[in-house]
Image: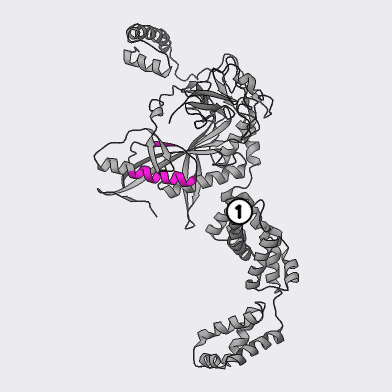
Amino acid sequence: MAYIIQGDTGDWEVVIGLEVHAQVISKAKLFSGAATDFGAEPNSQVSFVDAGFPGMLPVINEVCVAQAVKTGLGLKAKINLTSVFARKNYFYADLPQGYQISQYDLPIVGEGELILDLPDGSTRTVGIERLHLEQDAGKSIHDMHPSKSFIDLNRSGVALMEIVSKPDLRSPEEAGLYLAKLRSILRYLGTCDGNMQEGSMRCDANVSVRPVGSTELRTRCEIKNVNSIRFVQQAIEYEARRHIDVYEGGGTIDQETRLFDSAKGETRSMRSKEHAHDYRYFPDPDLLPLVIDRAMVEAIKAQLPELPDEKKARFMADYGLNAYDAGVLVAEKASAEFFETVARGRDAKAACNWVMGDFFAALNASGRTIEDPPVSAADLGALIDLIKDGTLSGRLAKDVFALMVETGKAPAVLVEEKGLRQVTDTGAIEAAVDAVIKANPDKVQQVRDGKTTLLGWFVGQVMKATQGKANPAMVNEMLSRKVLG
Amino acid sequence: MSLDKSTVRAIADLARIEVQDEELDHLAGELSNILHFVEQLSEVNTDGVLPMSSVADITLPMRADVINDGGYPDKVLANAPEAAEGFFTVPKVVE
């Protein structure tokens, strides 16, 4: 399923590398003791360090370091026991120090990998170039005053992990899968909450194009700060087309920073960043090299949770699920746990079908989250038990499930209250079957003359007569026997 | 390494320092002299020598992940040339 763009001069492919800024989960900031909570009163979570006051010195937060190492291990990456902080110099109203403390040629995490789960069940490995720790900038708000920008430094100094992929992605779809998988891994690890709306995960996309079959890397453009997976995909699609149009029109692409306008669905040049590429990195004289212990890395490694790829493999091996179902169930840790609670001691395929089908549909429709589901895992499991022991037919179970969503009651309680127990009493079913046959002699004759598809109609009539409670297998068997003789 | 006038102009722009055109020649000479002085260090053979990051053999001290600072927006804003509603305010930065 290669993504090929047809141009006037031939076929083109797109080359994409993503830089993700993931906000580290920690109580305090990377180099100060100020809080990191989202949505606090402006400038209430700012220390003199974060505000860039003269003479203030940064002291690194050990938990932020551990979180970066943990993320590196989760991406099967090389951990650099010695890394160096550097100053990235630029002027902007929300950057009080006039530089961002970042890492340049010696990041804390080196090369790793991330596995994409493609919709057809296959996988593809994408290279991770590096992960480094850096400070976030403050926040500028432009719509509070006609001629002023308002600056809140609460975010200034919060720890970010910049995670850079190799230019291995070849379609907007793969870019989306990469972001979804990275988000999933970060959430499993508990190192970033992955919330793109609140900006705790932001993405820059580097995009270039080349003729199919070529291995050159052409000039790329960087699209900044796109805040949803869908927008990243739209921005890449637009940008690739723009490059092709420029090349085919005889022009050249300039390396530049661009902004995605989600309202118009297009990218445009960010003039203010034109001269910003000269960052004059140099080692931060306020900070010694960061040296971490091999033992610390090993201790973090020993406590890594089961990650999505391992969980998916286990779901396929232990529960016999296919790659697609397993991939969907493990994407969120909470859905995987929900499924395992439902499946424990039961038929895994049935559990999978219920969770992936009716349950996810009800979850979406209710607008609730897997942590606060419309039906608990225990109740869904109990429902499956009622099907297994013959109390409910599959059809009745769907009605009971709908009532569970509506009332929040346990399935056994609803079966009793509403009298939804499946009828398996041969006499009762036989009476209903006989009544339908007796009332429809003409249709019986049609079936006997060869129109066997009409048997389905008979089944429907019997189910109707029994308020859907008759055991469908028994009804089918009895009808075939009685009508066809 | 010697600097030409256009490089000095670019450095001044990056540093947000206002420099008149007539000052460029003089500054280019001064900055070049500084660079030449430092370049003497390259006479020393440093093959296989790791960069020295500190004169003392100490490693980066770390802090515990504890909230023990912040919570004083008035002090943070005390020296702001302009502020409103708890924010710093600056001439509009247009994108």
The chain holding disc 1 is A
Q: Is residue A345 left or right of residue A49?
A: right
Is B5 drawn above or below residue B59 in the view shown? above
Residue A456 image position (x, y, % from top left): 55, 82
Residue A101 image position (x, y, % from top left): 53, 25
Asked whether the viewer can see residue A314, the reply is yes
Applied colour scheme: one colour
Magenta extent: A219-241
Please tell me how crowded label 1 is: few (under 14), some (14-19), or many (20+) other residues with Cα within 10 Å: few
The quadrant of the rendering that contains the N terminus of chain A is bottom left
Residue B5 image position (x, y, % from top left): 32, 13
Residue at point 67% right, 30% down? B65
Residue at point 59% right, 64% down? A353
Asked whether the viewer can see residue A380, the reply is no
Label 1 sits on a secondary structure element that is: loop
At label 1, which amino acid type do we have? Gly
**Residue B78 lies in the magenta stretch:** no
Is B28 drawn above or below residue A311 in the view shown? above
Is A48 drawn above or below residue A262 in the view shown? above
Q: How many marks can you see?
A: 1
Q: Which residue is the site of mark 1?
A: A367
Residue A429 image position (x, y, % from top left): 68, 84
Is A173 drawn above or below residue A456 in the view shown? above
Q: Quadrant of residue A376?
A: bottom right
Q: Is residue B40 left or right of residue A133?
A: left
